[in-house]
Image: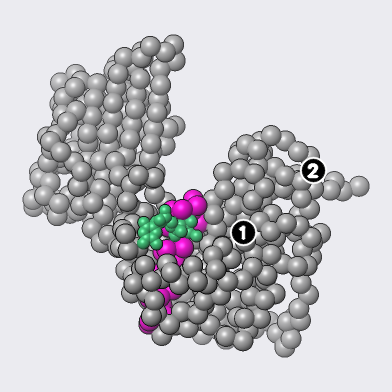
Amino acid sequence: MAKTLNFTCTACGAATSKWSGRCDACGEWNTIVEEKPLSSAGPAKKSLGAMKGRSIPLTDLGTAETPPPRTLSGMGELDRVLGGGLVDASAILVGGDPGIGKSTLLLQAAARFAQNGVKTVYISGEEASAQVRMRAQRLGLANAPVLLGAETNLRDILTTLETEKPRLAIIDSIQTMWADNVDSAPGSVSQVRAAAHELTTFAKRNDMAVILVGHVTKEGQIAGPRVVEHMVDTVLYFEGERGHQFRILRSVKNRFGPADEIGVFEMTGSGLSEVTNPSALFLSERGNPSPGSVVFSGIEGTRPVLVEFQALVAPSSLSQPRRAVVGWDSARLAMVLAVLEARCGISFAGLDVYLNVAGGMKLSEPAADLAVAAALLSAREDSALPADTVVFGEISLSGALRPVGQAENRLKEAEKLGFSNAIVPKGKKGAKIAGISQRAYEDLTAFVGDVFGA
Ligand code: TYD
Ligand code: MG
């Protein structure tokens, strides 16, 4: 007899046959709840009409070179993250922590699309239309030709969309929507999946783009946006640190453009404003050169971004010293520390290590290894790198420095922001930029000896 999979993870949607404290699929704690998976719930039956069972030759779909038709919002940061504008009839998920600014961003985007002649419906399941209008007033968008709806029943929403026939529908948020043919509470994995499925299918059939908003939930009964990631064409996450004004919109999946593209915004009293030069913003709080601070020239998506790494190294009173990281991968930090110890004989035993990426930015590029090593050494030796220096390069386990992609773009961005020195890995054909003098090293030992005299 087949096992019945009655338990579902609200973070990733994985189904299991028994409860456990931790989801085997995604590793999250306290996210498993008892709930029938979607297969037993059954989506609404609706005839596909003339298209039923018919297939079309691939060659009839136009030439392969034709790019998908796109519409620009006019918000450059958003358009770039979408891969160059909104693709017609596509489904997009915008996830993020509650209160990060998703509704603000999408209301602004809705207004811009509507002003560009795209018929746009904004459906809020969380706020009444009057509240949305108040927000629009605050954002200076009260006169934008956006249609507002305050609706949570999926059937009502689909009826509205069928009569209005918009080209873009924004659903804020997918967790508040419920389908009356699914037998579980709004926000549950089955409901969220069913609602997302119905809305994306409707969008594809009716040549309408749909943007689903999803709150990232830490635990409990509410399903998170990851549950619907596989149903949509594009997944964007809106990130930011509390206490920072910067917000980063990042594409983690995009069928129509590069993933890992970022758009940078600043939350102001009158909504989100675009930050077209993020490097300047991330470095704006930098003061005099201080030990532990190193500027890294990174690539986010298709564009270079300069960010500051800050490291602090202090004697530890713990038997197992602390390794605290904000904005970078802690496993990667452990690796850099291990290579420093094994290949250069520089030990961090007995020392607490704190590493932070300034401005609330999250980095994942291995190209930051050398900048991290430089920040750690600078903090440990209490000696600052010259303020006009940028660093990049990947460290291998042997201690060798590996050249990284787009070196030229990294150096150009540094030059643009007034830097005149760069510490880089030695490559076969190094990029040359007139305004930047480069110091290239083959391995970490040579770098440590030359820069820190150790
Ligand atoms: P919101 O868009 O409601 O977040 P989400 O939809 O992701 O839950 O944004 C809420 C926060 O944004 C709130 O703390 C107030 C702040 N905010 C501003 O700072 N300026 C503004 O113009 C607006 C509309 C909101
Ligand atoms: Mg909201």
Give me the residue at 37% from left, 54% from top: 248
Q: Residue at x 42, y 37 (%)?
A: 329
For the residues marked 1 and 2, what is the alpha-carbon distance in whole angstroms?
Answer: 24 Å
**Residue 103 shown in magenta:** yes
* SS at badge 1: helix
Observer-nearest of 30 and 364 = 30
Toward which corner of the image does residue 258 lie, by quadrant? bottom left
The residue that mark 1 highlights is: 175
Some atom of ligand 1 lies within 8 Å of the CB belonging to the residue at label 2: no
Residue at the far right in the pictured view? 1
From what the image shows, is residue 98 above or below residue 83? above
Give the residue number, with chain letter if any, for mark 2. 17
How many labels were placed on the picture?
2
Say whether residue 258 is left or right of residue 417. Answer: right
Kind of residue at disc 1 = Gln
Crowd class of label 2 (few under 14; some 14 to 19; many from 20; radius 10 Å): few
At label 2, which amino acid type do we have? Ser
Residue 377 x/y as whole percent: 24, 25
Residues drawn in magenta: 95-116
